[in-house]
Image (spheres, helix red, strand yellow):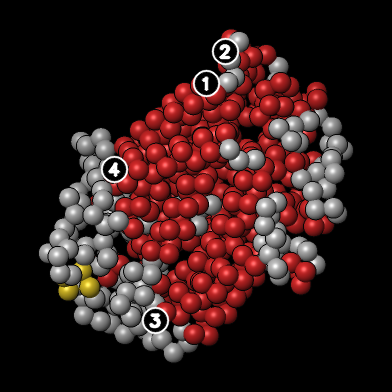
Amino acid sequence: MPQPQATSAATGHALIEQHGVDTIPEAERTSTPRDVLTILIGSNLAFGVVVFGWLPVSFGLSFWAATSSVVVGTVLGIALTAPLALVSLRTATNLSTSSGAHFGVRGRLIGSVVGLLLSLGYTALSLWVGGDVVVGALNRLLGLPAHGPAYVATYTVLAALSATAAVFGYRLLLRLEKVLMWAMGALLLAGLLAFAPQFDASAHGSYLLGGFWPTWLLSVVAAGLSGPIAFITLLGDYTRYVSPARHSGRKVLRSTVLGLFAGLLIPQLFGTFTAIATGGGQDYVGGLIAGAPLWFLVPLLLNGLLGSAGNTGLMLYSMGLDLDAILPRATRLQATYVVAGLGTVLVFLGHFVWNAQSAVTSFVLVLTAIGAPWAVITLIGHVRCRGDYDRQSLQVYNRGTRGGIYWYRTGWNIPATVAWAAGSAVGLCGVDTPVYHGFLLPLTGGIDVSFLLSGAVAALLYLGLSRRQRGPTGRPTAAAGTARAGVGPRT
C-alpha cells in the first residue's frame, strides 16, 4: 500500500520533526522569506565557512586579490544556485526528491547522493575546524593539553550537539539560527577589532600554481564558487516550508540571494582578514589562536562550539533527508544518526590522517565539478515546466510504488542522466587539485574551469537529447502509483 503522509509538529505539540522527504502539507508551510534569509546567514557564521576565506591566502594571494576572487566566485555561484530555492517552493519537498521531475523518480537518487557527499564533506570540515579552535583556545586559556585525546573529546561533543539539533529538525534549527545570526555576527565584528593592529593588506606568499592568474582562478572556484555550490541540494530543505500561496517566488529568491551573499561573504572575508593579520597562510587555526588577544579567546571558544554546532546541525539535517531519500525504509531520525557517525569519522581522518589544505581543496573542486551539471539540468527542467509539478508523482519511489508522470523508463530519464554523467566526466577531466590534475588542463591553459565545462556540456546535451520530450514536465502523463511487490509503507 502507498505510504501515508507523515504528520508533523507544526502545531507545536511534538518536539521532533516527523517529516522526512514527504510532501509538506500546506497548513504546515508557515515559514517566511525572512526565515530563509535568517537560516542562511545564521548557519554560516561559523569556522567551517570562515576557513574558506583562508584558502586564497594559503594559495599565496594578497588580501585584495583574495577578496576579489572570493567575491567573484560567490556571485557566480549564487547566480547558479539561488534559483534552485524556487523548485522546492513549488514541490513542497526537498530538492533531491524534486529533481525526480527531471531525472526520473529513481534518477533523482543522483541528487540525493551528490547532496549527501556535499553535506558529509562540509560537516566534517566544520567539525574539524570548530574543534581545533576550541582545543586551541582552551590550551591558551587554561593550559589544557592540545593532544589527541583532547581533539577526540572535542570532536565527539560537537558531533553530539550537532546531531541533537539535527534530530529535532527544522523548527528548532530555525530558532537556533535566529540567535546565532546576531550572536556570531557580533563575535566576528569583535574579531575585526581584535586583529586590526596586525593587518597588512599587501602581504602575500608564493603563488600555489606559479602565477597570479591561475592561482586567482583556482581561488575563485575553490574558495568562492564552492560556497554557494554547497547549497545546491540544501536550499529546498528551507523553502519547502514556505507557501507560494502566501509568498511570491520573487521574495523567496531575493531572500535566498541576500542570505547566500551575506551568509557566505561575511565569514569568508573574516577568514581572509584574520589569515593575513596572523600570518596563518599554512596553519590558519594555529595562527589565529596564537595571534588573538587574550580577551578574544572566549569569543573564539564560543564560536567554535555554538557556531559549529549550528552550521553542522543544519548539514546533518540535510544529510539525514538525503539518506532518507536513498533508503526509503529508513526514517529521518535513523538516517540522521548514521550520517552523524560518518561525519565524525571523517573528522578524525581529516585531523589525524590527511593534509588539511590538500584534502579541503581537492574535495570542493571535485564535488563542484559533479554538482554543477546536476544543478544546471534541474534548473533547465524547472524553467521548462514553469514550476508546475505533480507532487504525488514525485513521491512514487518514497512510497514503494511505480508509475506517475515522472516514471520515464523504469524510473530514469535517460537524457538527463546521460547529460549529467557526461558533464561530470568532462568536469573531472578539467579539475586541477593539489592531488589530481585533469588531462584537459593543457587545453584550458592550465586553468581550472571545470565547473564551466561540466555545466556547459550537461546543458547542451540535455537540451539536445530531450528536445523531443513532450509536455510541461517532458513526458506524457502516465498512470500513477502501482504498488511494488514486497514493498510496504515505512515505519
Q: Amino acid at mark 4?
A: Leu
Disc 2 to disc 3: CB gap under 8 Å: no
The x and y percentages for residue 480 are 21, 75
Q: Is residue 140 above or below residue 50?
A: above
Q: Amino acid at mark 1?
A: Ala
Q: Are marks 4 and 3 in contact (CB under 8 Å)?
A: no
Q: Which residue is mark 1?
A: 150
Q: CA distance from mark 4 to mark 3?
A: 34 Å
Image quadrant assignment for residue 147 = top right
Q: Where residue 275 appears, x then y in whole percent?
A: 73, 34
Instruction: Give amino acid for label 3.
Output: Gly
Question: What x and y, as percent, mark residue 448?
Answer: 71, 62
Look at discs 2 and 3 and give the one toward the viewer. Answer: 2
Instruction: Report the Cα–Cα distance between label 1 and label 4.
Output: 29 Å
Q: If you read the primary sequence from the N terminus, does the residue marked by circle 1 or circle 2 appear first?
A: 2
Q: Secondary structure at mark 3?
A: loop
Label 1 packing within 10 angstroms: few (<14), some (14-19), many (20+): some
Q: Secondary structure at mark 2?
A: loop
Q: Residues within 10 Å of mark 3 (few under 14, many from 20)?
A: many
Tell me the number on the disc at residue 26. Answer: none
Residue named by callout 2: 144
The residue pinned by badge 4 equals 333
Q: Earlier in the sequence, mark 2 or mark 4?
A: 2
| Depth check, front residue: 53 or 215 | 215
Q: CA distance from mark 1 to mark 2?
A: 8 Å
Q: Residue at x 20, y 51 (%)?
A: 6
Q: Nearer the viewer, mark 4 or mark 3?
A: 4
Q: Nearer the observer, disc 1 or disc 4?
A: 1
Judging by the rendered image, the residue that carries numbered circle 3 is 474
**Could you say whether the residue bearing mark 1 is in a helix, strand or loop?**
helix
Is 406 left, or right, of 87 in this rendering? left
Counting residues from the start of the chain, the first of labels 1 and 4 encountered is 1
